[in-house]
Image (spheres, rainbow, N blue to C red):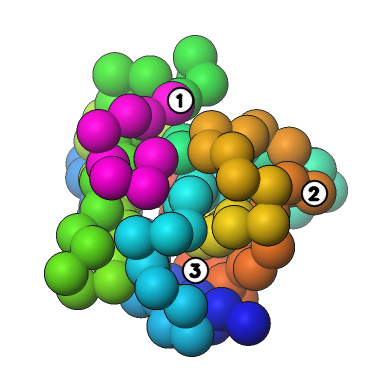
Amino acid sequence: QVQLLESGGGLVQAGGSLRLSCAASGRTFSTLAMAWFRQAPGKEREFVAAISWSGLNTHYPESVKGRFTISRDNAKNTVYLQMNSLKPEDTAVYYCAAAWSSGQWGAAMTDEYDSWGQGTQVTVSS
């Protein structure tokens, strides 16, 4: 099993930036396809970003493209989410997810992922 621990959430004003981190353990990190999702109160969990095993390929929905950047450091077993130009509608709990059983990366559906972190709150004030 893979354990994921997110950090870096907090309160920020609209237009500001935050960087989330997710440390993984329990499996060789370079074999994990990684992603970030978010969930706002009363809404379904939403895909935010995905990155391939090597980090050379990334995938974003239109809602965050150009503002968010996912990256990974396989030597540190960590994936990051740099969030710039934050908006109040970005307010949510952000979750890190790992996939290995499918052999695929970039999935936007939650059931494609095998392990999840506990989440970190991001609040953007207007």
- Residue type pointed to by label 2: Asp
Tell me the crowding category of disc 1: few under 14, some 14 to 19, or many 20 or more residues within 10 angstroms, Cα based.
Answer: many
Residue 75 position in % (x across, y down):
16, 69
Q: Which of marks 1 and 3 is nearer the N terminus?
A: 1
Q: Could you tell me how far apart the alpha carbons at marks 1 and 3 are, in whole angstroms?
A: 19 Å
Give the residue number, with chain letter if any, for mark 2.
Answer: 111
Q: Could you tell me how far apart the alpha carbons at marks 2 and 3 are, in whole angstroms?
A: 20 Å
Residue 13, numbered label? none
| Secondary element at image label 3 | strand
Give the residue number, with chain letter if any, for mark 3.
Answer: 120
Asked if disc 2 and disc 1 are in contact, CB closer than 8 Å, the reply is no
Give the residue number, with chain letter if any, for mark 1.
Answer: 60
Asked whether residue 10 appears in the rendered view, the answer is no
State the extent of the magenta-drawn residues as a range: 52-59
- Residue type pointed to by label 1: Tyr
Q: Quick check: 69 above or below 80? A: above
